[in-house]
């Protein structure tokens, strides 16, 4: 372990939404933190407040290329990857490469440094699920050649590669399956339902619900997710663990909720449902509860209010530009 600190940790994708919140948590918790990112979908704005801190360092690097880090490493969090459906449809090859080649590089680094590695998997490994809610034992229903396949299969490969490094090389690995998470530092234009709806509501534009809006999602506030990941990293549990908020809502009701909270005059309009869009999604968090003593604490109403206040500043800035 690094002298005087709780450990040295590399966070890939640390200039993105989730990675930057994790960086905050570990910097504030007294770890020596290195963020590695190539700004493909992230932004320097997300980590600007950390620059100059003695226990923070940034390395600009594409993790699909050989990853070099000087000195020892105790932990690696591999979070680099486009994550919103719009992003990974625009960047299918980068998405496949970061999930496969990038994961291989980071597992190799973990092995060389004898570091514990946690990889960011996703509820998308369950595809359009036939089991509801989704528990970790479910193997999923994924269309490998559909448009979402580039993300889903990259993440499934990532899990397979991680288990292989664990079984064959004895690397200490952790796998978190993250369900839809939201909060400040999401990009207003990343196409995900929450930033899309909030941006439209704040600009007084029509709210675009895809399909009839009966498909469901379960939204987790970012602080809850970070706490779950922190606990998983420090646990001894190698099999995948779902982290998410089981509070399920239809997308149509979610749009109505955002209209109500923002007080907008916006109307809901319906657009085509994208191909292979999962019809339901809700985490079974029995494992996280029993193994990590974790469960979400932030109500959607409170999390949405914080996130909407954050987006107000962004919409205002765009209008003034
Ligand atoms: P994000 O797009 O905000 O962050 C991803 C970060 O990875 C960005 O900063 C981007 O620049 C960086 N990146 C991408 N390719 C890279 C490469 N080749 N080399 C270096 N950096 C690279 O997305 P996010 O929502 O913060 O998601 C982070 C991780 O969590 C992703 O792996 C994603 O699959 C996973 N995840 C997120 C959610 C969610 O609801 N946000 C759900 C499930 C899984
Ligand atoms: N969605 C929508 N309108 C939008 C963006 C998304 O109705 O402007 C729907 C999308 O089809 C999906 C759900 O909202 O059913 C959640 O989409 P998101 O992109 O947030 O992530 P996903 O959970 O599909 O990965």
Image (spheres, helix red, strand yellow):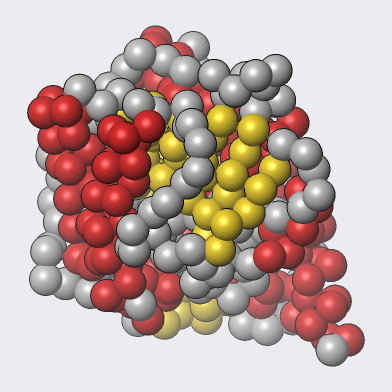
Of all residues, the one furthest to the front in this rendering is 71
Who is closer to the viewer here, 317 or 45? Answer: 45
**Whether residue 125 is situated above or below residue 185 in the rendered picture:** above
Horizontal relation, residue 162 to residue 61: left or right? left
Whether residue 297 is visible here, answered yes or no, is no
Residue 46 lies in quadrant: bottom right
Residue that appears at 37% across and 32% down: 113
Residue that appears at 54% across and 19% down: 1
Q: x, y (%) of residue 218?
A: 46, 44
Residue that appears at 27% across and 75% down: 93
Who is closer to the viewer here, 284 or 42? Answer: 42
Residue that appears at 45% across and 79% down: 270
**Whether residue 78 is situated above or below residue 64 in the rendered picture:** above
What count of labels does the image hold? 0
Q: x, y (%) of residue 4?
A: 70, 18
Residue 81 lies in quadrant: bottom left
Of all residues, the one furthest to the bottom in this rendering is 321
Horizontal relation, residue 320 to residue 182: left or right? right
Q: Quadrant of the C terminus?
A: bottom right
Q: x, y (%) of residue 166?
A: 20, 28
Whether residue 304 is visible here, answered yes or no, is yes
Horizontal relation, residue 192 to residue 155: left or right? right
Residue 128 lies in quadrant: bottom left
Q: x, y (%) of residue 13?
A: 50, 55
Of all residues, the one furthest to the right in this rendering is 320
**Whether residue 108 is situated above or below residue 206 in the rendered picture:** above
């Amino acid at each position: 372990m690094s002298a005087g600190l709780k450990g040295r940790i590399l966070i890939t994708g640390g200039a993105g939404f989730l990675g930057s919140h994790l960086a905050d948590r570990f910097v504030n918790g007294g770890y020596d933190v290195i963020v590695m990112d190539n700004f493909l979908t992230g932004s320097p704005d997300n980590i600007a407040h950390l620059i100059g801190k003695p226990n923070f360092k940034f390395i600009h690097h594409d993790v699909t290329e050989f990853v070099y880090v000087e000195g020892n490493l105790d932990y690696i969090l591999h979070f680099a990857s486009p994550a919103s459906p719009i992003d990974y449809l625009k960047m299918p090859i980068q998405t496949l490469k970061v999930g496969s080649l990038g994961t291989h590089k980071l597992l190799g680094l973990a092995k060389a440094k004898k570091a514990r590695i946690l990889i960011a998997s996703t509820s998308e490994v369950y595809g359009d699920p036939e089991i509801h809610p989704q528990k970790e034992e479910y193997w999923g229903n994924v269309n490998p050649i559909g448009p979402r396949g580039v993300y889903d299969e990259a993440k499934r490969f990532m899990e397979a590669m991680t288990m292989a490094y664990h079984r064959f090389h004895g690397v200490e690995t952790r796998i978190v399956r993250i369900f839809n998470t939201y909060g400040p530092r999401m990009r207003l234009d990343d196409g995900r339902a929450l930033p899309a709806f909030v941006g439209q509501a704040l600009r007084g534009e029509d709210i675009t619900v895809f399909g009839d809006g009966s498909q469901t999602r379960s939204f987790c506030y970012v602080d809850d997710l970070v706490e779950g990941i922190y606990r998983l990293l420090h646990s001894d549990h190698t099999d995948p663990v779902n982290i998410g908020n089981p509070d399920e809502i239809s997308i149509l009701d979610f749009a109505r909720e955002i209209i109500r909270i923002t007080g907008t005059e916006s109307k809901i309009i319906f657009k085509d449902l994208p191909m292979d869009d999962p019809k339901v999604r809700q985490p079974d968090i029995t494992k996280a509860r029993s193994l990590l003593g974790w469960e979400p604490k932030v109500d959607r109403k409170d999390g949405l209010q914080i996130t909407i206040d954050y987006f107000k500043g962004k919409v205002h800035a765009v209008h003034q530009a």
